[in-house]
Amino acid sequence: MPSGPVYADLRSRLKVSALHTVCQEALCPNMGECWAQGTATIMLLGEVCTRGCRFCNVKTGNPRGVGDLEESARVADEIIQSHLKYVVLTCVDRDDLPDGGAFVFADTVRRLKAGRPELRVETLISDYRGSLESLQTVVESGPAVVAHNVECARRLTPEVRD
């Protein structure tokens, strides 16, 4: 079970700030260890995904373009004040947003870099439905790593994943 003062402090900060982590949503058993070592994965754009993959436990729905306009600032404020050394920013899929949420990623990265230049920031982005413009928005914000989950070939998805 995740435990310890570092875990308790970060969990409390995230709860008060209404921020979501993949660590918590997935009930990751390594959460306490990762957080104590200075790594966490923050889930941007809320907790409701617009896709309904059967292999995933994240809530599915249609947020209808509604987003938290203060999320980037809250994430940056909490992470800048934390002990974290490496932050992964990921998200639910937001096909209801014109840019898939790329602006939120870019804004968050810029704020984190401005507040703590030594902090390493990885972006684990969605596919943006193939939009190179959305991808460019994220890349230009300057994260240390831009990553994407490539699950499997499209023709195999129905058999392997869904």
Image (tube, rainbow, N blue to C red):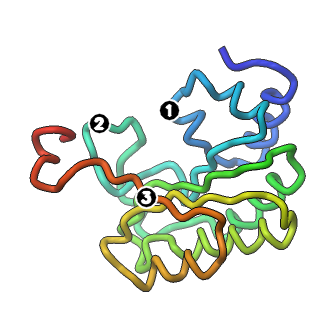
**Mark 3 belongs to which amino acid?**
His
Q: Position of residue 25 (x, y in %)?
A: 53, 36
**Sequence-first tag of 1 and 3:** 1
In front: mark 3 or mark 2?
Answer: 3
Q: Is residue 70 left or right of residue 156?
A: right
Residue 65 in the image: state x and y as whole percent. 45, 70
Position of residue 99 relative to residue 31, above or below, is below
The residue positioned 71% from the left and 26% from the top of the image is 33
Spatial separation of the CA atoms under disc 2 and disc 1: 12 Å
Q: Could you say whether the residue bearing mark 1 is in a helix, strand or loop?
A: loop
Q: Secondary structure at mark 2?
A: loop
* In the foreground, 130 or 9: 130
- Tell me, yes or no, whether the two marked residues, 1 and 3, touch with CB atoms within 8 Å: no
Nearer to me, 104 or 30: 30
Q: Which mark is residue 55?
A: 2
Residue wearing tag 1: 26
Residue 84 is marked as none
The numbered mark, 3 or 2, whose residue comes first in the sequence reads 2
Q: Which residue is mark 3?
A: 148
Q: Is residue 107 left or right of residue 93?
A: right
Mark in the foreground, 1 or 3:
3
Q: Amino acid at mark 1?
A: Ala
- For the C terminus, which image quadrant? top left
Q: Mark 2 Cα within 10 Å, few/some/many (few <14, many 20+)?
A: few
93 vs 89, left or right, is: left
